[in-house]
Image (spheres, rainbow, N blue to C red):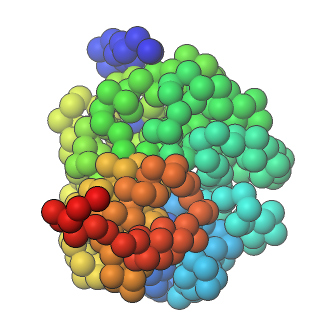
Amino acid sequence: MTDIKTATDNNDSERRVTIVDTTLRDGMSSVSHQFTAQNVADIAAGLDKGGVRTIEVAHGIGLGASSLQYGFAAETDPDYVRAAVEAVTEADIAVLYVPGIATIANLQGAMDAGAKTVRVAVHCTEADCAEQPVKWAKDQGMNVMCFLMMSHKLDPEPLAEQAALLDSYGADVVYVVDSAGAMVPRMAGERVAAVRSAISADIGFHAHNNLGVGIANALTAAEQGARYIDGSLRGLGASAGNAQTEVLAAAFERAGWDTGVDLFPLIDTAENIVAPLMKEPQIVDETALVLGYAGVYSTFFHPTKRAAQKYGVSTRDILMELGRRGVIGGQEDMIIDVATELAGRTYETPGAKR
């Protein structure tokens, strides 16, 4: 097991983190990808005013995902990027690239629209899938961040080996990503510490809040060497949502970190722009909690609820079975398989003779 030590050792010069906001990408999943270009411009402008210098924009599943399978977005990815670029004065606009969903042509279109950063997301055991887009983006002069999704599924040392591959491809930042919201602080700290010891690139951390410890996980990740911390306004994101950007800003300041952001413009944007656009409050309900407990990918949240209602079974049973089967992002078709199997089972009457 990785030995946990405080990476900063109380050196004030090292106590600086960069908050990256993903309201306009991960948050898309909570609004059925229906933000308009004007919504994007308004939120991006507020984030820019608050000092956030990297803002992620795209369909909730990433570039090229607007489809029947993942849900059609209200606008195209280049339209979203262009709206954000035109609304900010200081921030860079980032996009998400998932190999197998996005293509280089999609990334070229986003870059033409003004995106300067790409976040290449792969399952935590499949870092080699990122080699082509990472190298292509670096050749184009883009800033490249890489996501090791579902990082809870690997122990720290093998996760660090995957991170080293991304580092070798030229990634500027490698993220430990809690896609299912399944980690608690020690798990987050162990993984970040192991990655820190294995790579020269900067380290990021992306939290989901299914177990209610997203902020605590982010703080622990920073103590172990993560220098890029993701959040979203009002916590808007898949399932139980992300670590909340404005709360991150306040909590990190209280913990003695320099974030470079201005809290009150972030609160104003969250309260006056994002909150009215939300379909429902971002909470840890039963489905979100069980999803994190079972370690299932956050985007399974809404499809599981729909399948449970359609087939007359509980979301809890579906998610626990999906967790037992070790499903990952991209295997959403398994939700229906599991739901139909559960619906077809016959149970013995309590007390009946066997």
Side (left or right) of 261 relative to 150: left
Asked whether residue 338 appears in the rendered view, the answer is yes
Residue 164 horizontal/vertical position (percent): 67, 27
Q: Is residue 133 left or right of residue 52?
A: right
In the visual, does 210 lie left or right of 174?
Answer: left
Name the spot of residue 81 as percent of width and height, x first. Answer: 59, 72
- The residue drawn where x is 45% and y is 33% is 227
Which image quarter is the C terminus in? bottom left
Count of number-bearing discs: 0
The residue nearer to you, when weighing 31 against 309, is 309
Res 106 → quadrant: bottom right
Whether 308 is drawn above or below 226: the answer is: below
- Above or below residue 15? Residue 132 is below
Task: State the residue lying farthest toward the front.
Answer: 353
What residue lies at 50% left-to-right and 25% top-to-bottom? 156
Q: Please name whichever residue, 180 or 61, is drawn nearer the observer in this view of the structure.
A: 180
